[in-house]
Amino acid sequence: MINITLSDKSIKSFQDYPSAIDVARSISQGFARNCIAMEINGNIFDLNNQIKKDCKIKFITTKDDKGLEILRHSCAHVMAEAIQNLYKDSKLTIGPVVKDGFYYDIDMESVSEDDFSNIEAEMKKIIKEKKEFKRISVTKAQALETFKDNPYKIELINELLDQELTLYKQGSFIDLCRGPHIPHTGMIKSFKLMKVSGAYWRADQSKKQLQRLYGTAFFDKKDLKKYINIIIEAKKRDHKKLGAKLDLYSFHENALGMPFFHAKGMEIWNSLLEYWRKEHKKAGYIETKTPVLLNKNLWKKSGHWENYRKNMYTSVIDKEEYAIKPMNCPGGMLLYGLKSYSYRDFPLRAGEIGLVHRHELSGALSGLFRVRAFHQDDAHIFMTLEQIEQEIIGVLKLMETMYSKFGLGFHIELSTRPEKSIGTDEQWEQATNGLKNALDKYGQKYFINKGDGAFYGPKIDLHIKDALERTWQCGTIQLDMALPERFDLTYKGKDNKKHRPIMIHRVVFGSIERFFGILVEHFAGKFPLWLAPVQIIILPINDDLVSYSKEIQSLFENQGIRCEVDIRTESLKKKVRNAQINYIPLIITIGEKEKNTSTLSVRTLDGKVRMGISLEKFLDPVLKHIKQRKLDKKIL
RNA sequence: GCCGAUAUAGCUCAGGUGGUAGAGCAUCUCACUUGUAAUGAGAAUGUCCUCCGUUCGAAUCGGGGUAUCGGCUCCA
């Protein structure tokens, strides 16, 4: 007799050893149909696993994230089988689940997206057969025998300990896999191959390049549709396209990966930085600026010459070798070293909007998201050991304030000591605990990335979430145990002795260019009033009203509002359409009526028109909206 | 840098099978003087990414290169 405790604490008894699916069926057939796997003590098993002793089980269903991952993993197996059927010489390597789906790296002839319909058709055949996923336990020797024609699998198997290995079989297709899997292929109701690219075996450029096929799968057709719609929406918002359409920035062949900002783009840029400066001043930062071109000696001292040289642009001046800065820190260190500091000067928060250049691989460049020249909203904060906690909390609060201004949420990740690192165990522990304590006090929950820190110190990363729920790593706080040492930075403590300051690097926007691009996509080009490059456009109804319209324009401009007048002799309809598609937040029409009564007719981007508004009634809320940098779409 | 796709007017795109290019929008001119998402007519606009080759003849076929896009990779 076996007693099984379910997650609602009820107990079911069985005479023999039931499989998990039997247990699920004993609850209801409908429930069983939605079950994917079971979880015992945090370990996940297939549904056809027999339960041989009393335990507490939790079913993983189509509603769970874990269930979706299992489905996608199974779909990867189906794709692999389809490819093996169609491409006889193909050799499977690995096929994991990723954020929005799965991929499988396969050693095979190169395929293009045109081949997808073929592969998908083959996958559908396999799904229709409702093949059962069978788990087979084998010894290492048996596994090596099974995959004797596949050097990749052999490499993988040999790396595993001499434990029992599991294979999964659907029909005659067999793959090395830890599992678990869905009960049968028929449960894959909707899937789609997404893209294909090259990927090196073990991410190693010296190894063979494989074909990486990406796909995704969902339990419900509606979810797949929703996912595809988000991709379509993201395409519409593509900052590369919107940037050209809205005349914000461009790229040129003569400066690959280095953006040119146009007049309208600069209006946004300047508004953004004006805000940045305001918040930083409020948070007690000073602003500094260091040179772009610095002597090689400095880069040797900082360690960049040794560790980052392949990404640095260099030049020879007066027979001396120079490098264009890829980071601001060494310059910042020089500034600190210029005078002597006391603990009373701490915390010293020195900001710098620094222009850095990094030689990224040509294939990695992508609009404003990946560039070779960009501005970092950097700052170096020097402090005593005791100040770490409070300083980190201060930075986190500043980031929270600034992100929320754009309606961006975020999550936090803490990265700890990597394998290759400098410093003593004690230093790392102290530093990591400092960050941890700050995070705990700050209160928002955070994830830990073990071993993902920089080699010179642990770090906190903030990942913002945009309007399409995509996440972007922007903010980072990095504790640096190396540079103060390398530059022999000191301060005088209370004890009148010299001490080494604690130093952190931190950015809020990260790369301002990239953040700009994120904002374009986040707002889909419809910037809030305070950021909009043109805040108001005035449309005179006929040529006679142009001069009056210009009077109104200068009235607005004197208030610091960015305002244009559309003086073309075009129909009002056309001018309105033009203003709308350029996402100008406030569209003002001037006709005889408005001129005679000194009122305005105001159209907002939602298409609503308000007539007969007096100048004061208009200006008051508009100026307030701009000054407070409101996100609210409602202006009037 | 690697794999794949793409490259035609300022923009979006047409141009089976080789005979040196076309539409819409934008621009300019003229007429219309417009009341809330495209007034009409006309004009101008091209190294068909680039180089080499095949051919009597190349936007079109072949090869090299460049850039862009999707990935890989890199990320002190």
Image (spheres, rainbow, N blue to C red):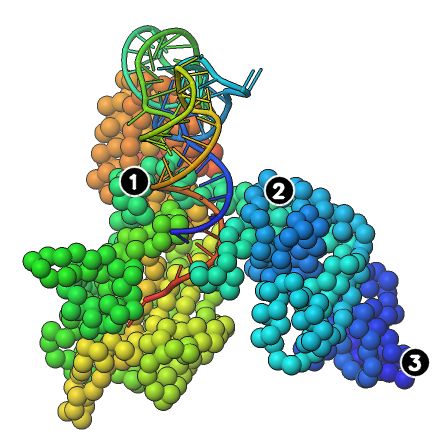
Residue nearer the viewer, A31 or B62: B62
Mark sitting earlier along the chain (3/2):
3
Dot 1, how many residues are within 10 Å of its Cα: few (below 14), some (14-19), or many (20+)?
few
Q: Can you name the residue that lies furthest to the right here?
A: A15
Left or right: A408 as drawn, with respect to A152: left
Are the two marked residues, 3 and 2, in contact with CB atoms closer than 8 angstroms?
no
Q: Which mark is drawn over residue A15? A: 3
Residue placed under numbered mark 1 in the picture: A252
**Cα gap from disc 2 to disc 1, whole angstroms:** 34 Å
Q: Position of residue A621 (x, y in %)?
A: 35, 45
Identify which residue is drawn at 26% across, 59% down.
A312
Rendered image quadrant of residue A340? bottom left
Identify which residue is drawn at 39% across, 81% down.
A432
Please give the chain letter of the residue carrying mark 3.
Answer: A
Residue placed under numbered mark 2 in the picture: A115
Nearer to us of marks 1 and 3 is 1
Please give the chain letter of the residue carrying mark 1.
Answer: A
Q: Can you name the residue that lies furthest to the bottom here?
A: A495
Disc 2 marks a residue whose amino acid type is Asp
Q: Position of residue A594 (x, y in %)?
A: 34, 26
Left or right: A9 as drawn, with respect to A29: left
Q: Which mark is drawn over residue A204? A: none
Residue nearer the viewer, B29 or A186: A186
Mark sitting earlier along the chain (1/3):
3
Q: Position of residue A250 (x, y in %)?
A: 32, 40
Are the two marked residues, 2 and 1, in contact with CB atoms closer than 8 angstroms?
no
